[in-house]
Amino acid sequence: MATHKIAIAAVFVALTIGSAAESQAQLWQPYFEMEGRGTSLRAVSQGHLMVPLKEDCESLLFADIRTVWSERGATEGNWGLVYRRMVSDCAVVGVYGFYDYRETEFDNDFGQGAFGAELLGCDWGARLNGYIPDNDVVATPRANRAIVQGGTIVVQQGLEAAYYGVDFEYEKMLWGQCCCDAGWLQDVELWATAGGFYFDQDDNRFEEIAGPRLRAEMRVFDLPVLGCGSRVVLSGMYEYDEVRGSVGTGALTVRIPFVRG
């Protein structure tokens, strides 16, 4: 099953890159991001590919493709389309839809549809996401803990199941410094995000997972070694729910743009 999913993803990537290469517009660059993050529960690595498909001066349609690896052997793939449009000089509205697939460390497969909307300003942003999984419950005697991975929620208590739910967030830039003409210094921004999440399962053997989520980020742009359009983000996140308790996460994300000729 995993090999089949990976093959589909490879074809999708090839098609989207090919479509982007044929486009005459060059307003937006495709990019690849690498992320590593860790908590007291697990360590996770992620690859993220963004490929513009159709663009003009006011709108952008792009493919968003992500793959996640856990140190415990779980893998996850997310394939989606995102559409964003300017509605004023400093406001963008976006909508998106994804298909998420996860193979757990116990070799169980789960899929879900994810969708959302966003409103982005020059120094703020708001997002609302929803998740609709398949509701199969799989008996897994070895499982005994709760895992939250991206939008996919899998609770492990001798059983595994994907949760449905929502999450939301509001982000605000607290400080920004433009260092374009300051030699080795780069543009730097500090952001803070506040939000929450609610996930549940129809099977009453599973507990709901709900609580607040806080995040802080330092974003550094256009590093000379990575090129124009690059970005490095150092972030820390805190969230709480009654199933897992308090969870802190640290992450480092590096964005590398692809320059189109």
Image (cartoon, grey):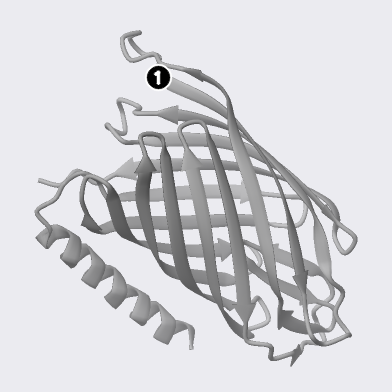
Question: In this rendering, is residue 68 above or below 28?
Answer: below
Local crowd at mark 1 within 10 Å, few (<14), some, or many (≥20)?
A: some
Q: Is residue 19 above or below residue 87?
A: below
- Residue 143 lies in quadrant: bottom right
- Rendering coords of residue 15 (x, y %): 22, 72
Where is residue 9 shown, x and y percent of the image? Answer: 36, 75
Image x and y of residue 200, in percent: 78, 74
Asked if 38 appears above or below 229 in the picture, the reply is: below
| Viewer-nearest residue: 31 or 127 | 127
Vertical relation: 228 (above or below) 95: above
Between 148 and 225, the one lying in front of the other is 148
129 on left or right of 147:
left
Toward the front, the furthest residue is 88
Quadrant into which the C terminus falls: top left
Q: Please indicate, yes or no, whether residue 57 appears anywhere in the rendered image.
A: yes
* Left or right relative to 68: residue 32: left
At 42% from the left and 56% from the top, the residue drawn is 48
The residue sitting at 24% across, 46% down in the picture is 258
Q: Residue 248: in sight, yes or no?
A: no
Report the residue at 72% width, 82% height from top: 161
The image quarter in which residue 216 lies: top right
- Taking depth in this image into account, of 147 and 123 the one nearest to the observer is 123
The residue under label 1 is 186
The foreground one among 180 and 257 is 180
Residue kind at label 1, given as amino acid type: Gln
Left or right: 64 with respect to 58? right
Q: Residue at x 54, y 42 (%)?
A: 125
Residue 154 placement (x, y as % from top left): 71, 74
Say what secondary structure mark 1 lies in. Answer: loop
